Image (cartoon, helix red, strand yellow):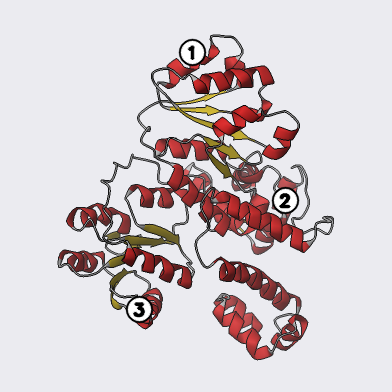
Amino acid sequence: MDGTILVADDDRTIRTVLTQALTRAGCKVHATSSLTTLMRWVGEGKGDVVISDVVMPDGNGLEMLPKIRQDRPDLPVIVISAQNTIMTAIQAAEAEAYDYLPKPFDLPDLMKRTARALEARSAPSRPAPEVPDQPDELPLVGRTPVMQALYRLVARVMNTDLPVLISGESGTGKSLIARAIHDFSDRRTLPFVTVTGNELQDIEGPARVLARVKGGTLLLDEITDIPDDIQARIVRMIDTPGDHVPRFMATSQGDLAEALDKGRLRQDLYYRLSGASIQVPSLRERVEDIALLTDHFLIRAERDGAPKRWLSTDAADLFRAYSWPGNVRQLENAVRRLSLTSRAEEITRTEVELVLGNQPEMEPVLSGGSSEKLGAAVSRHLRRYFDLHGALLPPPGLYQRILKEVEFPLIEIALEATGGNQAKCAELLGINRNTLRKKITDLDIPVTRRRKLM
């Protein structure tokens, strides 16, 4: 690489790592913990690419993007952020950031994106649309790779006119994603209308619906539950929408391929709705997000007047092990109930058991009852990951990212099983003890875990 990179991050370790890596790659680097300093450098004409955090001691990294675009429209900005919500990804896209990466990021991936930004720095920039006022938070929270891929896909399809088909289990947030796409799109000032098959039963139903939506967004709720004759009517409505063409979106539970095979979804309707397909992962597929979501809902409950609460370690472990058949919606309801009924600030495992005991399918995610082989489970998750990117390929560096995703829990669980004894763990894994130590360091196992291991 050849160029000057401006790095702005309040984390000294990140500044050091990026400076060393970029310098070794042949770049000049200016690093700072201040947005004020960064903007001074930009104003002086320094830098070919900017890498900036969002939350900084003296401001918000996203808010400086319009100024950079105005003064230096050919300067690409890569946004990195620990605020792992769909809001951050969408705001980065709205502010015309060149790229967005969640923390913790994969360094080789960031280096490749920086190289591409250096190559693309002469490309023209489009004027940024105005970002609408939104609540401080959306209940689409997650830092797992599968959720980050979903956020980036949402940001890419947001301002297109493609129809969107959103599928996933009940309670995963399908309608929330549809609403987020509308609220941040160019149609945000127009109506967002959700309809079911009942509203389209009579022959005048489509005309009434189109009159309500007025060129905004029309969401067809649970499309596979709509009878075949009404699905045919929807096909005709999509083909002849009148003068004010809305954006069509639809939600669906279950397997779409199965719905097509069994005739619950017409092929002609599927082809018209699947311009962009978004598969929303179940909570079982992003177990690492459960703690983040739980904290999110406890804070929200406190804002709504509930007492301050937190989960004990044992209670958090039970939350992590539960199957959550109702997904995020079920998790939110359980947290709200616990925030009101817990007898102390710390929610105990017994209290969680009482709440979850009244819920359906009380079974551990990692129970021995599943007959699915490991290879089949890995294959299923990888296909889901590729599907989330739609027609695009995932970011480069996939092989190393997948290896890390597998190695981290394997070593972590093996260490727990051997009581933190590294010699036994290395023997169990069939690797050298020094190799194990290096992997513990490279994979950045938390400090608290390391103390127990040593």
Task: Give the structural element (helix, strand or loop) at label 3.
Answer: helix
Distance from the alpha carbon under mark 3 to that under mark 2: 43 Å
Query: Which quarter of the image is occupied by the C terminus?
Result: bottom right
Q: Give residue 375's position: percent from left, percent from top.
A: 75, 62
Task: Give the structural element (helix, strand or loop) at label 2.
Answer: loop
Compared to residue 64, the image places residue 180 above or below, namely above
Left or right: 195, with 160 as reference point: right
Distance from the alpha carbon under mark 1 to that under mark 2: 42 Å
Compared to residue 199, the image places residue 186 above or below, namely below
Q: Quadrant of residue 222?
A: top right
Q: Give residue 139's position: percent from left, percent from top.
A: 51, 45
The residue at which mark 3 appears reads as 19
Q: Which badge, 3 or 2, comes first in the chain's sequence?
A: 3
Amino acid type for the residue under numbered disc 3: Thr
Amino acid type for the residue under numbered disc 1: Arg
**Front: mark 1 or 2:** 1
Q: Give residue 374's position: percent from left, percent from top.
A: 76, 63
Q: Is residue 378 visible?
A: yes
Q: Which badge, 3 or 1, comes first in the chain's sequence?
A: 3
Which mark, residue 323? 2
Q: Mark 2 Cα within 10 Å, few/some/many (few <14, many 20+)?
A: many
Compared to residue 94, the image places residue 265 above or below, namely above
Residue beneath the point at 37% across and 32% down: 187
Q: Mark 1 Cα within 10 Å, few/some/many (few <14, many 20+)?
A: few
Q: Is residue 309 visible?
A: no
Which mark, residue 451? none
Amino acid type for the residue under numbered disc 2: Ser
The residue at which mark 1 appears reads as 208
Q: Which badge, 1 or 2, comes first in the chain's sequence?
A: 1
